Image (cartoon, helix red, strand yellow):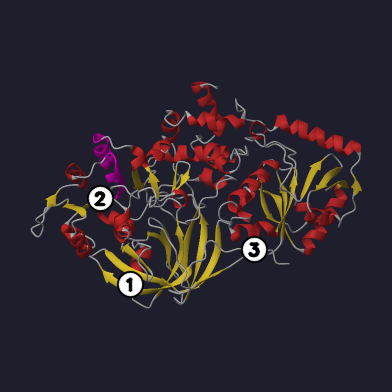
Amino acid sequence: MSQRCAEMKDIYLPQLATIVKTEAMNVTEKYLRLSMDDGRFEYAPGQFVEVSVGGIGEAPITISSSPTQKGGFELIVRRIGNVTNAIHNLKPGDKVGIRGPFGRGTYPVEEARGRNLVFICGGIGLVPQRSFINYVLDNRDQYGEVTILQGTKCYDLRLFTSEVAAWEKRDDIQMLETIDEPDDCWKGNVGVVTKLIPKVTTDLKSAVLLVCGPPVMYKFVLLELDKSRVPHENIFLNLERKMKCGVGKCGHCQVNNVYVCMDGPVFRYSDLATMPEAI
Amino acid sequence: MSVKTINKDDFAELLDVLIEQGNVIGVQAKGDRFDYAPLKSAKDLRLDYDVTLQPPKKYFLPPTEVLMSCTVCGAYKSEYEDHPFILLGVHPYDMISINQMDELFRQDNYDTHYMTRRNSATIIACDVARPSENVFASSMGTAIVRNGYDVLLTDIGNSYVAEAATEKGENVLAKARTTEADDAAIKSREAVWAKNRKALNRHELKCDPGYLPRLLNKAYDHPIWEERARTCFSCGSCNLVCPTCYCFNVQDDVSWDMKAGERKRVWDGCLLDGFTQVAGGHEFRKHRSDRFRHRLYRKAKYVPEKIGGQIACVGCGRCVAACLPDIANPVSIFNRLIEDLGIE
């Protein structure tokens, strides 16, 4: 007598994907382009996947490419633990396991249509934001003004330097960049990303603002946005947590009563009012 | 559904048949306390127990469980444990915790691993014959249970009233000499229930349990979390013994030849330092008081939101006994909040 729930899908079982391309972005970040072996993969900007390396483990990584770009999907992986170290050792042709994409809380693709957008990114916060940025750029006529603020700790850790340079050249994007620590190679802004906010030419109050960065950044960015009286329902924050299972069971990513893996990772700031653990 | 009477000698006989036919897990003495363990003989069963050291959750969510096998840097394959077993002697409050867990693992994303074990089980529950030192099931409305089990036994002296609630349960009782329960037996069972509804109450909650989510709505910044957590060891004992704690971690292990591996699910606890730590070291619930509060909020607010308002503390009292600094007692926490914040 088999009691197995054979007809049901195993929510923990990864599907194989092949690494199509890799590139070292700097000393800690690696770029990967992946393609699902069964070909099926649809996602929305802001969603994440659980990446498995057989025998090593699994880690949640947010997708960096835009669904408008065909030919697999892109992940940027920081070398920081067992799994991410193992991912750094992989080459094109190697296999990883993928579960997902996960997260109902994605970037407000529809709501933002026709409005001005301000992306505020700290460090690898640019990685998830890039998914929506490129979605907007691929549907450029459907969105208003685009402003991108990028703050990076030091010069060597800057990401997507050629892509950022290309954005800088476009006359339909206000691209502002800063680094925290002065560097001989850097002629631009120095200081934290909040210092760029007063330089934004778009009307902040009516824009849709998208914020992603390290936890410490949110407090300061939100304080700065409050000074400009930006309505909280116009601000979207990417709350990355330890999304261990990705399916709302394991409890690790819970912020008060909310599972980030299910209801996030992107949240509307005004919805966080009842979640004191969020910021 | 049928309600029978089975005398205790016949029940022992039935039990020996069940043991011979398969895997029976039953409550047994462990020193001067009790715990679930595989039964070797009917005489080892102790349905007169007060509370088991461990809740029965480990039979559905084992402390370590293989979810999948894999090849190193290759594909994963689901692994399932589906050997039928009988779990015998589950008290009503523990049965309710299993019912809650079933709902949590079923909803949103159906957990085939948990549910395979759960569907492999035949649960023979039994009403409490002897209140434990810290039980407060009467306060939580969990002193008796009317669903989830396959068979419910109630000790009425020389015999048990045995209610089969499912086909599995009917099949078990069909193997024994039973008689239809008469009015006297039914009345005796109701007397046990009436008694237990009041008597399993070593700590008395000063409100209806249904009020707890609203109480917690205004208790987030109450000083009690800090006061209690000051002596918390962050040992996670309260998580370990709680029948409704089910947070887990997932980890991979590699075989000695570096060719194959396994992905395992292991118990975790929200009181443990590092539970919310992400890559890079940031910990979102760094303070003990935050973790302490989170557990109580899960029991009486967050999880109830997911299971139709049922409070996810079933009043077993195990955390009260397990907590070394003696800060875990949920009733004393809730009563203090009621005292300070009142009931609306």
Dot 2 corresponds to which residue?
A145
Q: Is residue B161 left or right of residue A143?
A: right
Q: Earlier in the sequence, mark 1 or mark 3?
A: 3
Q: Is residue A19 left or right of residue B121?
A: left
Q: Give amino acid for label 3.
A: Cys
Dot 1 corresponds to which residue?
A89
Quarter of the image for residue A188 reads: bottom left
Secondary element type, mark 2: loop
Counting from the top left corner in percent of width and height, residue B86 is at 73, 56
Counting from the top left corner in percent of width and height, residue A276 is at 39, 37
Q: Nearer the viewer, residue A220 or B178?
A: A220
Q: Give amino acid for label 2.
A: Glu
Q: Which residues are magenta?
A: A205-228
Distance CA(mark 1)–CA(mark 2): 40 Å
* Chain of the residue that carries numbered disc 2 in the rendered image: A
Q: Nearer the viewer, residue B64 or A44?
A: A44
Pointer 1: residues within 10 angstroms few (<14), some, or many (20+)? few
Residue beneath the point at 47% across and 28% down: B218
Dot 3 corresponds to which residue?
A5
Answer yes or no: is residue A129 visible: no
Pointer 2: residues within 10 angstroms few (<14), some, or many (20+)? some
Counting from the top left corner in percent of width and height, residue A71 is at 37, 71
Decide whether residue A25 is among the magenta residues: no
* Chain of the residue that carries numbered disc 1 in the rendered image: A
Answer yes or no: is residue A164 visible: yes
Q: Mark 1, mark 3: which one is toward the viewer?
A: 3
Counting from the top left corner in percent of width and height, residue B292 is at 46, 38
Q: Are marks 3 and 2 in contact (CB under 8 Å)?
A: no
As displayed, is residue B55 above or below residue A82? Answer: above
Q: Are marks 1 and 2 on the same chain?
A: yes
